[in-house]
Amino acid sequence: MFDPDTLIIAYDTARGESRGARAKGVDPQSQGLGDCVDCGICVQVCPTGIDIRNGLQNECIGCAACIDACDTVMDKLDYPRGLIRYSTENAVSKRYKPMDIVRRAFRPRVMIYSGILLLLSGVTAWSLATRVPLKVNVLKDHSTLSREADNGGIENSYQMKILNTGDQTRTFHISISGVEGLRLVTNDEITVTGGGIGSQTIAVIADPDSAKSGSSPILFTVEDVSDPAVAVTEKSKFWMP
């Protein structure tokens, strides 16, 4: 994504070299010098300790401390600011004018990257606006796949965890479907505080002849009793002997 037209912190080599100290008011060109007085302040203020005069380096974090320091020195010597400035490699080497830099900013790759960024931003905003503040996890109790209840029905046990990702306390209703006559034995409601996790053991029972032997797919639906739009459905299995 980086190319010679990318905006960076750049040192104007053509203007600054050769470096050297000089007295204030002396024409540096008469001494064969550039505008850089080789004071080293730009290196001293750099939090990563690099010398920007050696070109852009990976350690540069773009803090612009060197720009402020150099401009202060230029002001004291009555030199134009901008020996170190925000610019591009091409702008510095080819002496682009400001409008040339602006026109180069609208090259195809920048427009493509901008379009991708806008698309991703839109998708992210849409997902945040439409997300359901609820997550549900249902785990089958594998220690006992099924057992015969006192009334002759077949019972399966599950461990349900409900994560309320919203900021308000919600009461959720638990329902089950997938096998004819399937019903909950335990409490079908659970209250979870905002940002909290609710855990509950769920016992489900079915008539012995309501499904074939083995596993049958079932669905757990967890729904906010006060806001039906906040609902999640999780798949699981019901085992018959």
Image: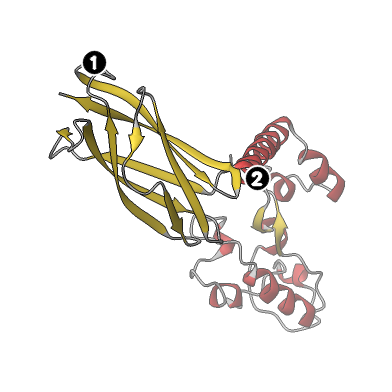
Q: Is residue 30 left or right of residue 46?
A: right
Q: Position of residue 231 (x, y in %)?
A: 52, 41
The colour scheme applied to this rendered structure is secondary structure
In which quadrant of the rendered image does the N terminus lie? Answer: top right
- Number of residues whose C-alpha sits closer than 10 Å to that of mark 2, classed few (under 14), some (14–19) or many (20 or more): few
Residue 27: mark in rendering: none
Q: Residue at horizontal 76%, vertical 65%?
A: 82
Q: Residue at horizontal 38%, vertical 24%?
A: 178
Q: Which residue is most to the right?
A: 99
Provide the secondary structure element on which disc 2 rests: helix
Residue kind at label 2, given as amino acid type: Ala
- Which of the two discs, 2 and 1, sits closer to the camera? 1
| Disc 2 from disc 1: Cα separation | 43 Å
Circle 2 residue? 129
Circle 1 residue? 212
Q: Position of residue 156 (x, y in %)?
A: 23, 35
Numbered marks: total: 2
Q: Is residue 20 left or right of residue 239?
A: right
In which quadrant of the rendered image does the C terminus lie? Answer: top left
- Number of residues whose C-alpha sits closer than 10 Å to that of mark 1, classed few (under 14), some (14–19) or many (20 or more): few
Q: Is residue 146 left or right of residue 105?
A: left
Q: Residue at horizontal 64%, vertical 64%?
A: 18
